[in-house]
Structures are given as structure tokens and as C-alpha cells.
Image (cartoon, rainbow, N blue to C red):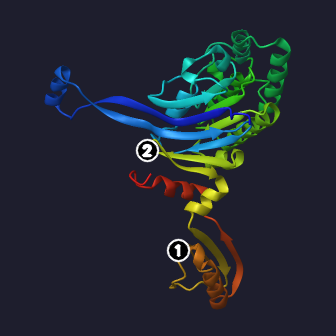
Amino acid sequence: MERPPVVVEELTKIFKVPVREAGLRESVKSLFKREHKMVHAVAGISFEVGAGEIVGFLGPNGAGKTTTLKMLSGLLHAESGKADVLGHTPWQRSKELLSQITLVLGQRQNLAWDLPALDSFDLNKAIYQIPTADFERRRDRFVEILDIGDIVTKPVRNLSLGERMKVEICAALLHGPKVLFLDEPTIGLDVTMQRRLREFVLDYNAVEHASVLLTSHYMADITALAERVIVIHHGKILYDGGLKVLAEEFGGEKTITVHAEAVPAAHDYGGVIEQTAVKLSIRVPRSDVASTTARLLNDMNVLDLSIEDPPIEEVIERVFATPKDEA
């Protein structure tokens, strides 16, 4: 059986962080005796990413997402545990591995600020020793998909945030990496730019059969790109599985919305999300959906009724709310 492109086993990263109390006295004291605490940014996580798979990597700020991506791309050494990316230990930073992976950090500048993006593309061609035919094929396809033909000749400093992000991700993929680590690639972008970048990632994944590990605070990114998600909190994995199953496991309630000729002001149907004279949205346990729906249809002249799972954002928030000792 072929080994997955990304294999993580009990990966751990600990940071030594200086601490001191506020005030002048503590400031002077810290000059002679500095105290530190050990922070487990990543605490023994294990997972795999299969060939051609897109996996959403979710968690609140400080959960350990970016630290994990930096270890898997070779920017940080692990304290303990193992990581195997395309048959290599990433922090050994072998040329063979670096030529097959990429790390894109949202709103981080990697291109030459005063040069047109095309010049940086040519520089990447030289650095990665990309065959001319492959380089031109990818460059022209990327420019067309991202619709950046009129901006790649402008100095990068003259581009908007959305335009810079498009040329950044284009440059990051010109060498045809087989594994993509994308850390908030759409952060700060408008809805149109976000959609364009998502389409680009999907196209690249389909054509190159690349594996993608993606972090994002925009759930639209995750739902559009990933069928599987990994939820990390306090450096530990809370969930690893299907996006739909996540809603079923952690979303123990359903949302019922009715439009009626008249909605009673007082009732006990369930937790009210929204209520007007003619509309009612309530949250009820899954086990009570059938009985509550029957009551609503019996008590009101219902014009329309819908039953939905809670938004995935709410589901993730509930996962994040898991106490640290339960994680």
C-alpha cells in the first residue's frame, strides 16, 4: 500500500516563553532573574493526509495550526514525534522535499516588492530549475484562471491586497508542488477574491493531484474545498473526520423555521433564534424534531416550514468550547 504524502505521529512542539508580573519592580527583577514557562503549542498530534486529498485544519487562534504547518514545511523543528512528508523529515530541509512542497501564509509578502510579479515568476523558475515548457504551461494557465494578465506586469507594491494574494499563490505553485500547506490564504479578501482563489485551489488539486492542508477562519473556504476536517484546540486534536459527520456528532440540535399566518407571542416549542408576528426560528434537540414539527403544524396555519442542521460555524464553536481537560 502506498504511503500517504503526509504522515504525522505524536508530533509535539514546546515553546519557552518569558513571563513576569507588571510593574517597575518586576521589570528590574527580570533583568537579573528571568522566569519562563513552557507552552505546549502542539501536544502529540497524529494524522495523515492522503494523495490528492484536501483537508481543512480548524481551530481558534493559538490552537497550534500555524505551528503545525511550519513544522511540516520545515520552518520549525519538532520537540518530539515524527513527521513524514513525501518520504522526508521536513525540518531536515532536503532540496528534494522543498522542490515538492509549498507553504502559503496569508498576507505574508514573498515576492519582490518593487518588481513586477512576472520577474519574480522567472526568479522562481531559476531557483526551482523548472523546465521551460512546464513553467510556461503552468504560468499561462494560472494567469488565465486567476485573471491576472493585466496586473503581473505592475510592481507588486502597486497591487491591492487581493491582487497581491493572487500573484503570491500563483508564484508559490509554479514549481508544481505535490503538497500544499495553505495558512489563511483568503484572509482579508472580499467575497469575490475568496471565491476566485478557492476555484484556483480546486483546479490545481484536480490537475496536479496535489494534497492540501488548509487553515481558514472562513467556513466558506472549508465547505467549498474540504470533505474532511481536523479540529485542533490547545495543541490537541478534538476531531478528525468528515465535515458532514462533524455536524452530526457535535451539532446535537436542529433549526426549525416556520412562516405562518400568525405566530403566538408566548410558546414553549424550543429555544428561540428569531421570532416575528409571522415567522419563528427555533433550535430543538434532534430527538424532538418530529414531535415539535407536528405541534407547529397542529397549532398554526403554517405557510412554509424548513428543518436544517446548525451552521457549521456554530458547530465548530461548540467544539472549541470543549474544556481543555476534556480535549
Q: Where residue 161 sits in the image (x, y, percent)?
A: 62, 30
Residue 31 visible in rendering: yes
Which quadrant of the structure image shows residue 130? top right
Q: What residue type is disc 1 on?
A: Val
Residue at which label 2 appears = 234
The answer to whether residue 257 is left or right of residue 58 is: right
Q: Residue at x 53, y 22 (%)?
A: 75
Camera-nearest label, 2 or 1? 2
Q: Quick check: 212 above or below 314? A: above
Q: Residue at x 72, y 9 (%)?
A: 126
Q: Where residue 230 sits in the image (x, y, percent)?
A: 58, 46
* Farthest-out residue, bottom: 298
Residue at which label 1 appears = 272
Q: Where residue 264 sits in the image (x, y, percent)?
A: 56, 86
Helix, strand or loop at label 1? It is strand
Q: Residue at x 66, y 38 (%)?
A: 49
Which quadrant of the structure image shows residue 3? top right
Q: Quick check: 228 above or below 197? A: below
Q: Where residue 13 sits in the image (x, y, percent)?
A: 44, 32
Q: Quick check: 129 above or below 327? A: above
